[in-house]
Structures are given as structure tokens and as C-alpha cells.
């Protein structure tokens, strides 16, 4: 189901600028057109910013600023299954709404895009918990920000220090 929604979003990239995947059974209000006018953060599964081209730094920067405001949203309860077995900062992290960017284009060298993101966050003192979670670039790959080593999902020989940070998967 999520895969189908993501494919739909990618197909409609040129028509969309912002979207969120919401839980349809969660309370929300609608305007006169029948569109959501207020969505409580507990009803949002993920916020997605859809942009055709983030190769331009000013466009990327605008998305990062949007992401900072989204990352300030907090759910009432966290989404963890084994809540008591996790440290408090992980429980707090799970109350945040994940923020993704989907784009058709990025810099030809994806490392340049990652470097721009990291530089922007460093220069603006953006705390790790307010940073973007993931960027998907069509036909290039996925940039993932594993903020804490406990969130790294793969079995590997990496040390704990290597399990947190920015990763790129083609």
C-alpha cells in the first residue's frame, strides 16, 4: 500500500509541491472544498515535500527550512512497540513526524547535495532532532539521516559511531 502511494506521488511530481500521508481514521477538519484544513500531528504518518529539482541550493534550502518547522511537531504518544526498552531521547524522537523530500533531480554528484545539507545545518545550528529524515532522488538513490545509532536497522560490522549520520544508497 505505501509503495503504491509513493509511486503515485512520484508520477505526480510536477503537479504536487507538498503532501502528507495521513491516517484516514484519525480526526481532522475539512474546508468547503472537502480538503483537509487542519490535521493533528498524531494523524500524520509522514510529511513529504515534493520538488522536481533540488540541485539549486536556494530551492533545497527552502525545503530544509520547511522541514525544520515540520520536525517541531510532536505527537501525543510515541510510535514505539517496546517503549520502555528505549532511551528517552529515542522515545522523544519517535513522537516527531518524519519529513521526506522527493525530487527528480539533485546535483550530479550526490555527495555535493549531502555536503550542502550538512553545511546548512552546521551554519544554522540546527539540532539533529530538527533535521530531515530522508531524501529520495528519482533514478539516483536515497539519502538517509540516521540520527542515532539505535535507529540504524541493518546488521553490519560498523561501529556504533559509524551507524549514525548521513548515508546514501543507490
Image (cartoon, rainbow, N blue to C red):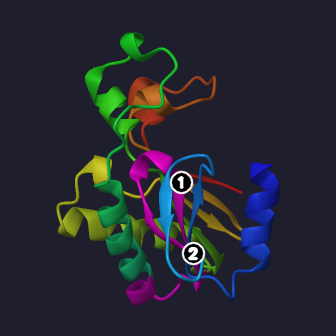
161 magenta-colored = no
Q: Between residue 68 and residue 25, name the one nearer to us.
A: 25
Q: Quadrant of residue 96?
A: top left
Q: Between residue 115 and residue 82, name the one nearer to us.
A: 82
Residue 133 location in percent, x, y?
Answer: 47, 53
Q: Quadrant of residue 5?
A: bottom right
Circle 2: element type: loop
Please state if 10 lies on the left or on the right of 99 as rendered. right
User: From mark 2 to mark 1, how far is it between C-alphas?
Assistant: 18 Å
- Residue 46 disc label: 1
Query: Dot 2, crowdedness within 10 Å: few (<14), some or many (≥20)?
Result: few
Residue furthest toward the front?
32
Residue 167 location in percent, x, y?
Answer: 54, 49
Q: Where is mark 2, residue-wise?
A: 35
Identified at 31% across, 63% down, the residue is 68
Identified at 63% across, 64% down, the residue is 136
Q: State the extent of the magenta-drawn residues as a range.
A: 36-59
Q: Upstream in the sequence, badge 2 or badge 1?
A: 2
Whether residue 149 is visible, yes or no, is: yes
Query: Dot 1, crowdedness within 10 Å: few (<14), some or many (≥20)?
Result: some
58 magenta-colored = yes
- Residue 31 disc label: none
Q: Between residue 19 and residue 147, name the one nearer to us.
A: 19
Q: Is residue 107 above or below residue 96?
A: below
Q: Is residue 97 above or below residue 19?
A: above
Amino acid at each position: 500500500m505505501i509503495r503504491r502511494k509513493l509511486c503515485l506521488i512520484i508520477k505526480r511530481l510536477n503537479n504536487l509541491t507538498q503532501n502528507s500521508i495521513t491516517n484516514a481514521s484519525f480526526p481532522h477538519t475539512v474546508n468547503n472544498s472537502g480538503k483537509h484544513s487542519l490535521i493533528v500531528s498524531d494523524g500524520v504518518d509522514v510529511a513529504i515535500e515534493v520538488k522536481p529539482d533540488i540541485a539549486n541550493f536556494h530551492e533545497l534550502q527552502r525545503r530544509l527550512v520547511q522541514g525544520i518547522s515540520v520536525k517541531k511537531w510532536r505527537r501525543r504518544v510515541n510510535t514505539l512497540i517496546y517503549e520502555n526498552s528505549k532511551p528517552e531521547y529515542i522515545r522523544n524522537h519517535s513522537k516527531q513526524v518524519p519529513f521526506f523530500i522527493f525530487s527528480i533531480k539533485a546535483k550530479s554528484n550526490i555527495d555535493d547535495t549531502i555536503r550542502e545539507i550538512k553545511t546548512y545545518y552546521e551554519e544554522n545550528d540546527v539540532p539533529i532532532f530538527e533535521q530531515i529524515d530522508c531524501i529520495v532522488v528519482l533514478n539516483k538513490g536515497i539519502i538517509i539521516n540516521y540520527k542515532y545509532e539505535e535507529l540504524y536497522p541493518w546488521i553490519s560490522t560498523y561501529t556504533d559511531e559509524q551507524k549514525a549520520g548521513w548515508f546514501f544508497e543507490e
